[in-house]
Amino acid sequence: MKEKDSKAGKKSPKSGIVFTALGTDTPKDFVSWHDQHPYRYWMHSRRIDEGENTSYKLLSIEVQWIGEDGLGTPDKMELGLRLDLAVLRIGGANSPMFTPTTFRNIALGQLLEAHALMLTNKQMKTTAKPKKAVKLVEKFETESYKNLFFNEDGTEKEPIYRVQNTELGATKRDAIFIAFVYAQQVQAGSKQPAVRTASLLGLNIKQVYVAVRIARRNDWLTSGGAGKGTGALTAAGLKAYKELDGKGLYQKFISDYLSEQE
């Protein structure tokens, strides 16, 4: 692997490569990294042999945030793991080429929302379940979702709204519970926390806005400014959630929805 040396003062962009060792032959899998602060870009190409013709086809691009100061040169462990993953990646002569148009056509906003929704679902499942000691056998767990956020043709699905919830109103107990669910959506990275909260609880979105205002008026929920979908429960909010039995409402109104989504 080779890299450009940093100049004095602000760090200059860096780049490097890692590839499979095949003696005198050209590498089969070739991974490069490029720092353009605050991001690092990883690219993986594979050698395609077609008769006497040899070419490389780009199979993967990853964007990693590294901050303005950067992370320095990737260590050997990371480079080795990324190369191992590259070797396992499927792709060959018939794989489509990456072009600038490829990225213009990516529904990034939808993907970010889908990621946030799956994260929230897992978080809600954990919150709804009674806490008990768990002995982990594997290093990780996996869950699969079928058409959770996208239709078969790739278009975004409309949020699944539950039957109109007539049990939740504008009481303080209801407000802190709704604010708690709203804050979970924000924490998971959703850009539409009010919409997601309304769909989760079977509420009109205006009810969510009212609950959020009540929570902020009582200093239960932080604010990022008017019109911004932000907010986290304050220490006073967490105390109110516990004292007003928000957990009881959570278990009552969340569990059924989670089973509907799977």
Image (cartoon, rainbow, N blue to C red):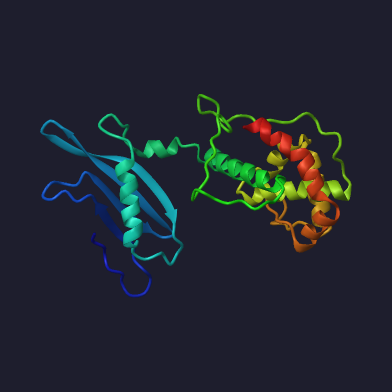
| Left or right placement of residue 150 versus residue 11 in this view | right
Residue 97 point in image, percent of width and height:
31, 35
Residue positioned most to the right: 171
| Left or right placement of residue 12 versus residue 251 in this view | left
Image quadrant holding the C terminus, namely top right
Looking at the image, residue 126 lies above or below residue 222 = above
Residue at 77% x, 39% y is 253
Task: Inspect this view and state whether residue 228 appears.
Answer: no
Viewer-side residue, 260 vs 114: 260
Quadrant in which residue 29 is drawn: top left
| Left or right placement of residue 192 versus residue 103 in this view | right
Q: How many marks?
A: 0
Residue 82 point in image, percent of width and height:
34, 51
Residue 238 point in image, percent of width and height:
77, 58
Residue at 31% x, 55% y is 80
Residue at 34% x, 62% y is 75
| Left or right placement of residue 134 versus residue 10 in this view | right
Task: Inspect this view and state whether residue 248 appears.
Answer: yes
Quadrant in which residue 220 is drawn: bottom right
Image quadrant holding the N terminus, namely bottom left
Residue positioned most to the bottom: 8
Residue 27 point in image, percent of width and height:
19, 47
Residue positioned most to the top: 153
